[in-house]
Image: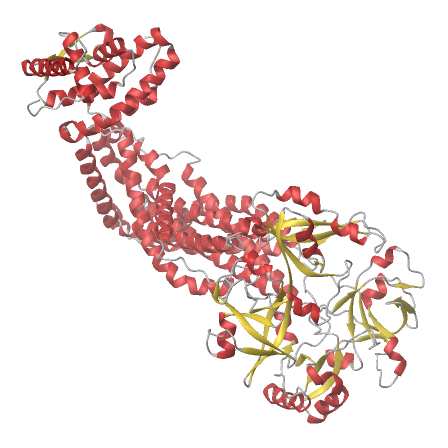
Amino acid sequence: MPNKPPRLATRLLHWLCPPHLAEELEGDLDELFQQRICEAGLRQAQWRYLRDVISLVPLALAQRNTDTVFSQNPTNTIMIRNYLKIAVRNLVRAKGFAFINIAGLAVGMTAAALIGLWIQSEQTYDRFYPKTDRIYQVYNRDTFSGETQAWETTPRPLAPYLAAHYPDIEAAARYRPTSFLFTTAGKHLNADGAFADPSFLTLFDFPFVAGTVQTALREPTGIVLTKSLATRLFGTAEAIGKTVQLDHTDSFLVTGVLDDLPDNSRFSKVEYLLPYAYFIAQGRGSDEWSSNNDYSFVLLKPNASASAVDAKIKAVTARQLNGILDDVSHRQIFLHPASRWHLYAKQENGQLVAGQIVTVRLFAVIAALILLVAAVNFVNLSTARSEKRAKEIGVRKVAGALRSSLIFQFLCESVLLAVVAGVVTLGLLLCCLPVFNEITGKHLSPGFGSWTFWLIAFAFVLFTGLLAGSYPALYLANFQPIRIMKGTFRPAQSAFSPRKGLVVLQFTFAIVLIIGTLVIRQQISYARERDNGYNQNNLLFSYLNGNLSSHVTALQQDLIKSGAAVSVSQSMGPMTEINTRQWGLSWQGSTKADKDLEFDRFGTDAHFLQTTGTKLAAGRELDVYRYPTDSNAVMLNETAVKTMRLSQPLGATIRFLSQDWHVVGVVKDFIFASPYEAVNPVIVSGPNKSVVLNWTSIRLNPERPVAGNLETIEAVFKKYEPSYPFDFAFADESYKAKFAAEQRIGVLTGLFSGLTIFITCLGLFGLAAYTAQQRTKEIGIRKALGASVGSIIQLLSVQFLKLMLIAFLIGAPIGWYTLDQWLAGYAYRIAIGPGIIVLTLAVATLIVMATVSSQAIKAALINPVNALRSE
Amino acid sequence: MKGTYLGEFEEVVLLAVAIRSGDAYGAAVVNEIEQQMGRSVNLGAVHSALNRLQEKGLVSSEMGGMTAERGGRRKRLYTVTAYGRRVLEEVRQLRNQMWNAIPGFN
């Protein structure tokens, strides 16, 4: 037959029809097909063939029900029932192995599920607003002395300008974070929120509990609260029409109550919104195009392309700034889509590149590998124990089982095991989630109520079962019945068996994770123990609210007199943060490029050294009370002296903010910002008019209990400003918070390497137990011939140690390279020395020995008589 | 029509079986209809019509012998039963009767 009808259609026919019907129908189809090739051509014939087959479907289905005799359905279900029964019997017979398999799979699946939930939450960040795909944030970009930078604050007039001049932009909103003291009937509390244009609410569509988008934020004296803030203020969410007073000045009418903003929104910390118009009416901020202090969000029209809009608006700010800035040729604005705000917000050479997404990907890889390690356990144990099943396979094959039906049987078994493990996983998940949430600082929940969860869970279990079961199924189904039945059957024992390879794979992963855990730990403690150059204990900072700033001198004297503080000074901000940055400095011998140098600036009136505990390297410290000219004096840190190449820093004159400052002292370097970064040059300046010292730093009296000191200080503060609560921050606590992110990664890596090691050990334990059992006779003979217990233990452990060593040779370089990349992100970092590598080897050896030796010892101690008598 | 309703397509198929009497199987009926009516029909439609006709007792069928032209596959041969023939005649009679009743059409 030269031309064949479409294969797929024929197959469909055979699949649907009982055989007798298929014969007759196919005959008809074929005849018509050949005939039509002659009449209308091959194409047409094929097309008609397909149409005919489809038209036969209802007929075939109707015939199927009446002719059950020919259908193979019942035998299928009978076999499946048989498979399940055998599977359950096998599990019950070898309880130990079943336990190892289920425990390993369950732990692996739990780890993967936890990471999965975390990844899901990371990926939904800012992607759930109804108009997410049309929302963009406007970023600024410019080049400073050859270095391109992007930043997210923009000029105040930008958003209205964009909305008015570009038809592709449907709406634009300005947004500016703020913090206020709220007062309602005798209640005071501080809360974080933001000023925003009315369009902000239409952009993001935050759901209202009360009030509407149309009325909220329109009036300059209206405020929108979140449900939780409203409840805290008024004791009820029904707050519409009530008033709150902010900072003891203006009163606002509550015009809307929002549902609390979701955790995975960048605005989750926002508790209220104030009209942006109020911010302008206060005379705060600036309308200059050169001052970048506001966030601008835009909503594009449904069909507008972001890249086209990007190109159109690129030069908006540059045009406005022409003539105001020296060089506007590199000044640009660009759009950053909402879907990328959380995961792709790392600024690099003026581009926003992968940031958090790197961590997300890393954890995705870890999840996949943990699951793989758990699957490998199953593979190893089932192939190792294949001899036990060989007879069964032989009998089944002789009785006519096809290779495909054996594969199906073993897949059924592994899926059954995965289902049991899945049930255990659910339990583990419920137990672990609270702890995991604490570590990650999230509120993850699997959503047991939704059917998508169960669908995903089912798919996950099925996937795990197939992942673990497919290799053993293929391996077992390939056994040759004749060799099994003759008894000459020996499962694969080549020099390199896949099983050994898989054990090496498991160990490699475990070793990489061990190195990771050790390196991250060491890096964190290295940074934590870094001498930060000042005394963090008993040091606290407080903002000078309301009247406090006009009574500073009296306040300071009272604090000292009360005995609660040993030293007090004014400052620009808490010392644990960067207060402000200063550039454009010039001094004798400075070059034009030096103007781009950035200095971190602090301010003080006096007693800087005693209050903070920093050390003087040269000269004297600032004291405006003793030397009135010190208002215009500065102290430098050692790094600043080095950066400025000053050989004689004392008495030098520096110019910035259009005035001269003279250097009176040099302070030893101290670390205030990130402990992982190199020390920046620092200027500590006196309280010149342009410097606002509205914070106070207080060194508590170490002789007295902290709680008592705080009470005393609060009383003194209340004396001068009774209407504000006493808010403060401890230096040591703020400093510790800087370790949180690394701490989190450290704990997570530790946790997951622990789990991996646990799973690997389970598998190893199973293999060791099985080998020992297999070699019982050999060990008996060896012992009878005089082998010592030690040599037998060695015999059984050495093979596993060898595998571990191979894994170490592969894993150590991988781990070293990966962690070195991670450390490259830190300026102040450890070097991965041989110490860590040796420690890893020691830990791995110890783990292997601990796992294997119990089995080895057990086997070695058996009385050879018992081992040999059994025949 | 005495309780046996014959659809338009069923009637066509029944006629085709009668025309091809002795050699009426699925593909042959399809060919016959396509030639007579000049339109294409689906094999599925023909087979389900044949099934219905058989259920109504208008045709009977039996498996034929193997032939080389169909790759050794047997075919199901349909023949019009006596009852089927009577139904066809009744249909024809009814048609004629109605034609004759149209005024000024002779």
Give the left or right position of residue A484, taking residue A316 as reference.
left
Q: Residue at x 37, y 37 (%)?
A: A471
Name the spot of residue A185 as percent of width and height, x first. 54, 84
Closer to the camera in the image, A595 or B21:
B21
Can residue A684 be seen in the rendering of this structure?
A: yes
Q: Residue at x 76, y 77 (%)?
A: A693
Give the left or right position of residue A361, taking residue A548 as reference.
left
Q: How is the image coloured?
A: secondary structure
Name the spot of residue A426 as percent of width and height, x first. 35, 57
Rendered view: B77 above or below A142: above
Rendered view: A238 above or below A861: below
Name the spot of residue A824 as percent of width and height, x first. 67, 52
Quarter occupied by the N terminus of chain A: top left
Rendered view: A422 above or below A609: above
Closer to the camera in the image, B56 or A773:
B56
Give the left or right position of residue A60, taking residue A294 as reference.
left
Can residue A531 be seen in the rendering of this structure?
A: no
Rendered view: A467 above or below A674: above
